[in-house]
Image (cartoon, grey):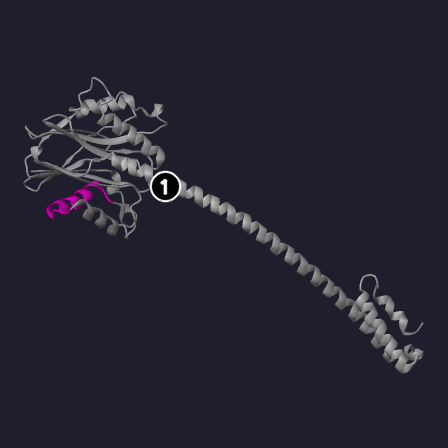
Amino acid sequence: MGLDKHLHEIDINVFPGEYNRLRSIIDSIEQQYGTDASKNVHIDELVSEYAKILKQTAKIVRISDNNQQKLRNARQKLEEQNEVISGKNKELNKANNKILLELKRAAEYVRSMIPEPAAFDSHKLKIDWSFIPSLHLGGDLLGFKHLDDEHFALYLLDVCGHGVRSALYSVSVVNTINNAHMTGIDYRDPGELLNALNQQYQMKDHDNLYFTIWYGVYNHKTKMLSYCAAGHPPAFLLDQNLALTQLGSDNFFIGIIKETNYKSEQVEIVPPANLMIYSDGAYEIPIDGDEMMTIDQFADFIYESFKANEDIKDIYDKLVVLYDNNPLDDDFSILKASFR
């Protein structure tokens, strides 16, 4: 049988190239050493080992080629998937940009409801404010308006939560206040107004939303300020003697308990004096580790600001510094009234 016996190591149907290569080597050996070359043990062993190596190499190459093809197929599939993902991302970015644009427009609308800072010579009164939502839209909103020739109303409210839902709710409440939607109510009486709001905006009827509010009415003839608060932090009044008084009311939020009775309180304003109304987002920041700033600490902070005659932007900037130069977590809203 000669050296041809080693050809069985390689299947010609599977590895034809390797089979023919071995066939050629055997023919060359037999031409040189004759057909009895297989009787030479050394030659026979070399041909046998070569045949086995050739077979193993062919298998490895075949496996490698197969893996390379699989890899090419996987890369092609990945590229196709990446194209699909890229298309989806473009659609998503387009949708997100549209949402952001709508949120921006909504935020601009909410802000447009707040009158521009103004000075009222007839009342010897100057109003300034700052309104910085923690998101595009927040639950805070403020306002001020003349009720008649003598009375001037100013208020700040804070709806629970953030985002579109809270903002829409705050807009509804402000429209009720600004447009006197509740008939038979004396808007010059803060307690009467808050009682009416509490009846109209019960949380069980409004998706469990509730709000805090500080509402005051200044009579520029009598120099009396009537005010009432519902779950809202006290306003700060700095009088002509640089004494700071907290003007607050121990009442529940609007919408919690329908039977709550809100009553107005009064204080005389002796010009020059400053009044500041704010939301809890202005002071609920950590200042000593995890300890949050208290109202009394915020009062001291505002007292120094009043004495230095700082504007509201300075107050916000200083609070941001206290918060390690990070934006505040909650809505920042402050309304300042200067009586002259």
Does residue 256 lie above or below 313 as drawn? above
Does residue 40 lie above or below 169 as drawn? below
Q: Residue 119, how many percent across, how many down? A: 12, 38
Crowding at dot 1, Cα within 10 Å, few <14 / some 14-19 / many 20+, comes out as: few
Between 186 and 252, the one lying in front of the other is 186
Range of the magenta residues?
Answer: 293-310
- Exactly how many numbered labels are in the figure? 1
Tell whether position 306 is magenta.
yes
Between 148 and 101, the one lying in front of the other is 101
Between 155 and 253, the one lying in front of the other is 155
Q: Residue 315, how many percent across, how many down? A: 19, 47
Q: Residue 50, how many percent across, how many down? A: 80, 73
Give the residue number, with chain letter if any, for mark 1: 101
From the image, give the main secondary structure of the stretch colored magenta: helix
Residue that appears at 29% across and 28% down: 172
Residue that appears at 17% across and 36% down: 235
Decide if residue 238 is in sight here: no
Decide if residue 165 is in sight here: yes
Q: Amino acid at mark 1?
A: Leu
Left or right placement of residue 267 versus residue 335 in this view: left
Tell whether position 8 is magenta.
no
Q: Secondary structure at mark 1?
A: helix
Left or right placement of residue 287 versus residue 118 in this view: right
Q: Quadrant of the C terminus?
A: top left
Q: Residue 200, how many percent across, how many down? A: 28, 22
Residue that appears at 53% across and 48% down: 85
